[in-house]
Amino acid sequence: MSPAKDPVVKLCLAAGKIQGDESWLRSHFERHGWILLGPEQIRPELLALQDAGYENSVAAVVAKLLLREPRRPKRKEHGIDAAV
């Protein structure tokens, strides 16, 4: 297969967390013709990978790591380690 004669390059940012006004950032990207993949686009795709069962691919393993529940820190209570 030969490469396209006039390829079009688009800049894209995938952001799992966006601090501040996402709508402003999204409109800024649209004005420049860039693509913004925010949490609402990324999470469903990660969930689909996570639910696909065991896959021997880096993407599936990373999805499982990103979506697993964080461990709750232990605290010392009266000299005994207790789950929070």
Image: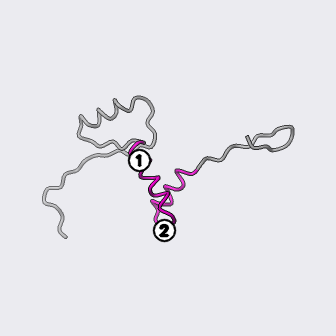
Along the horizontal axis of the image, is 16 left or right of 29? right
The relative height of residue 61 versus residue 18 in the rendered view (above or below) is: below
- Residue 47: x, y in percent? 47, 52
Decide: marks 1, 2 in contact (CB < 8 A)? Answer: no
Residue for point 19% across, 51% down: 8
In this view of the protein, which residue sits in the foreground, 5 or 64? 64
Label 1 to label 2: alpha-carbon separation: 20 Å
Using the image, tell me which numbered label, if any, was put on residue 22: none
Task: Inspect the image, locate mark 2, and give the three-letter code of the amino acid beneath it.
Answer: Asn
The relative height of residue 32 versus residue 11 in the rendered view (above or below) is: above
Magenta-highlighted residues: 40-68
In the rendered image, residue 27 lying in the magenta stretch gets the answer no
- Dividing the image into 4 quarters, which one contains the C terminus? top right
Q: Quadrant of the rendered structure where residue 27 is? A: top left
Q: Quadrant of the rendered structure where residue 19 is? A: top left
Residue for point 65% across, 47% down: 71
The residue positioned farthest toward the left in the image shown: 5
- Residue 81: x, y in percent? 81, 44
Q: Secondary structure at mark 1?
A: helix
Q: Residues within 10 Å of mark 2 (few under 14, many from 20)?
A: few
Instruction: Give the residue number, with chain letter if any, for mark 2.
Output: 56
- Residue 3: x, y in percent? 18, 64
Q: Main secondary structure of the magenta part?
A: helix
The relative height of residue 5 versus residue 29 in the rendered view (above or below) is: below
Along the horizontal axis of the image, is 80 left or right of 39? right
- Residue 83: x, y in percent? 75, 43
Instruction: Give the residue number, with chain letter if any, for mark 1.
Output: 42
